[in-house]
Image (tube, rainbow, N blue to C red):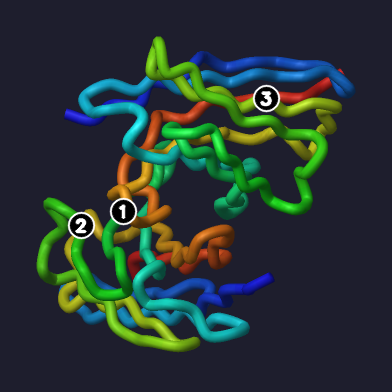
Amino acid sequence: QVQLVQSGAEVKKPGASVKVSCKASGYTFTSYGISWVRQAPGQGLEWMGWISAYNGNTNYAQKLQGRVTMTTDTSTSTAYMELRSLRSDDTAVYYCARDLSTVTMTSGYWGQGTLVTVSS
Amino acid sequence: EIVLTQSPGTLSLSPGERATLSCRASQSVSSSYLAWYQQKPGQAPRLLIYGASSRATGIPDRFSGSGSGTDFTLTISRLEPEDFAVYYCQQPGTFGQGTKVEIK
């Protein structure tokens, strides 16, 4: 069965960076893209970007361009999301999600979420 | 950039009632990419509907999706206690702001 297991909660100071991992299992990692979505406390879902696990192509949300980098390690079937120059409003639960199929970016499978807290 | 606007913000209904949730796009979107998710407190979102009208694996048939162009609808024919949650529509790159379905 498809599983996405994310790394644990992080506490960071403003201006620091965070790197969240998402280890995939139960399918051929390179066949599907991975999206990253975040949710600030009490707020809705915000799409951050998408990466092809096949060739590493990325598509980032415009508001995060320059601060976010998404990568994959095919040898370990793991996707990563790094966010730099953290601010207090980056405090959120960060989710990775796998494409439902090879022809859609609809997120069919989700990780459990990683809470990132940015506080001085 | 396409903006998805969901209405109403909150829907107060009783178990057994019918729920109708709307998602309107600021410009025409492909039905192939319109999805609906359910989220309960403390949980990750769960895919309900993809391609505007196809139910995801394991989703009960009381959930149905319809629409095209700029107007899409999620209908829950008879609300079960476990259906009270927040629902989001999505097309690649953006989510609606969500509709909370609460117990009346």
Residue drawn at 63 percent across, 73 percent down: B2
Q: Nearer the viewer, residue A76 or A16?
A: A76
User: Residue A58: image x %, image y %?
Assistant: 60, 41
Q: A27 or B56: which is nearer to us?
A: A27
Residue denoted by label 2? B56
Q: Residue at x 40, y 70 (%)?
A: B34
Residue B42 drawn at (x, y percent): 43, 37
Circle 2 residues within 10 Å: few <14, some 14–19, many ≥20: some
Where residue A10 appears, as percent x and y from the top left, is 64, 15
Determine whether, in the image, residue B95 is placed left or right of residue B54: right
Q: Quadrant of the N terminus of chain B?
A: bottom right
- Between the C-alphas of marks 3 and 2, the distance is 30 Å
Q: Which chain is home to disc 2?
A: B
Residue type, label 2: Ala
Q: Secondary structure at mark 3?
A: strand
In the picture, the quarter occupied by the C terminus of chain B is: bottom left
Left or right: A105, with B54 as reference point: right
The reply to whether label 3 and label 2 mark residues of one chain is no
Provide the residue designation for mark 1: B47
Q: Chain of mark 1?
A: B
Question: For the point 36% across and 39% down, which residue is it?
Answer: A32
- Amino acid on which disc 3 is placed: Glu
Q: Mark 3 touching mark 2, by CB under 8 A?
A: no
Q: Is residue B95 above or below residue A61?
A: below
Sort mark 3 into few (<14), some (14-19) or many (20+) by Cα contacts within 10 Å: some
Q: Residues within 10 Å of mark 1 (few under 14, many from 20)?
A: many
> Which residue extends farthest top?
A76
Q: Which quadrant of the structure image shows residue B96? A: bottom right
Q: For the residues tagged 1 and 2, is the chain the same?
A: yes
Occupied quadrant, residue B73: bottom left
Q: Which residue is mark 3?
A: A82
